[in-house]
Image (spheres, grey):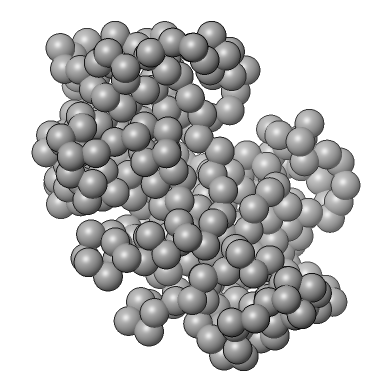
Amino acid sequence: MRAVEYDRYGPPEVLELREVPPPRAGKGTVVVRVAAASVNPKDCFVRKGWFRRITGRRFPRRTCYDFSGWVEEAGPGASGFARGDRVFGMVNGWGGGTCAEYIAVPRDEVCPLPEHMDIVESAAVPLAALTALQALRDIGRIGPESRVCVNGASGGVGSFAVQIAAAMGARVTAVCSAGNAGLCRGLGALRTVDYASERIEDSDERFDVFFDVFGNKPFDLTRGLLAPGGAYVTTVPNPKNLLYRLLTALSRTRARIVIVKSRRRDLETLLDLARRGALRPVIDGIYPMEKIRDAHRHVETKHTRGKIVVTVVA
């Protein structure tokens, strides 16, 4: 089978499409014939070696964490799946590897995909939407009438965060470019802030949750925007954010980092939102697996409108 691998950390040019042995279904795992994967900022950060203290120096490594496709084989202890079932999901950890024609995935990281959902576009959902859901519901604890600000609202995680917050009844302010304001309003934002002409940190508004998806509005800059008992949530696990998390561990105003976990029950929650018309992926580009380097370059522009999908289809 074909899979994308790399033998050293570096730019997109390190990515190679290779012939490798196919996986086999072990205990509690499902082998999936991959229709599509998607590229997230995490893929680029890992490929560059930003997290090498976690990911180590063992190569080759593979890329991509999201997937959609069809069940090829279910191993012992992976009951409930049959060959040909449509599925999607996300692999946990730092190994990645879904940009491959076949993958072996623990059964709890695989979820049945309804027939009405496009199998290629569905690959754009898991990692970004799970991140948004877990940040807002589990860390931010939002509910009806919660005031939520999403910084980086038109990107992959941000576009899902706006929709999820709106579906939960929150009042959403989206920080984005003027060109993406219409998109964010269409996703459910009540107000948009053009970051080029207005500094959100200078606003008189107060939020129950400030979700810094983009990563350029740290806690020390935005803590004044938080209502009593409010939460600052970021996707960036850098030393500064880890320190703020520690310093506010016992504080009413919290600084937290969302570390996404693939859970079948959360994937089912996303599917329920999609069935109700409250959640849809925003796709900025679809690349064939042979163009994986271009897909990574697109994400690295930091101006992606929604998600980047990579078609595999063995």
Residue placed most toward the observer, 135 or 158 = 135
The answer to whether any part of residue 289 appears in the image is yes
Residue at (45% x, 56% y) in the render? 266
Residue placed most toward the observer, 123 or 263 = 263
Q: Position of residue 53 (x, y in %)?
A: 78, 31
Residue at (18% x, 44% y) in the render? 169
- Which quadrant of the structure image shows residue 10? top right
Residue at (50% x, 82% y) in the render? 86
Which residue, as the protein is rendered here, is positioned at the far bottom? 83
> On screen, 219 above or below 102?
above
- Which quadrant of the structure image shows residue 6? bottom right
> On screen, 266 above or below 219?
below
Report the number of discs: 0
Q: Position of residue 164 (x, y in %)?
A: 29, 49
- Residue 30 horizontal side relative to residue 20, left or right: left
Residue at (78% x, 54% y) in the render? 61
Q: Position of residue 260 (x, y in %)?
A: 54, 44
- Which quadrant of the structure image shows residue 52? top right
The answer to whether any part of residue 244 appears in the image is no
Which residue, as the protein is rendered here, is positioned at the far left? 190
Q: Position of residue 251 (x, y in %)?
A: 44, 10
- Residue 10 horizontal side relative to residue 36, left or right: right
The C terminus is located in which quarter? bottom right
The N terminus is located in which quarter? bottom right
- Residue 193 horizontal side relative to residue 271, left or right: left
- Residue 55 horizontal side relative to residue 263, left or right: right
> On screen, 169 above or below 88?
above
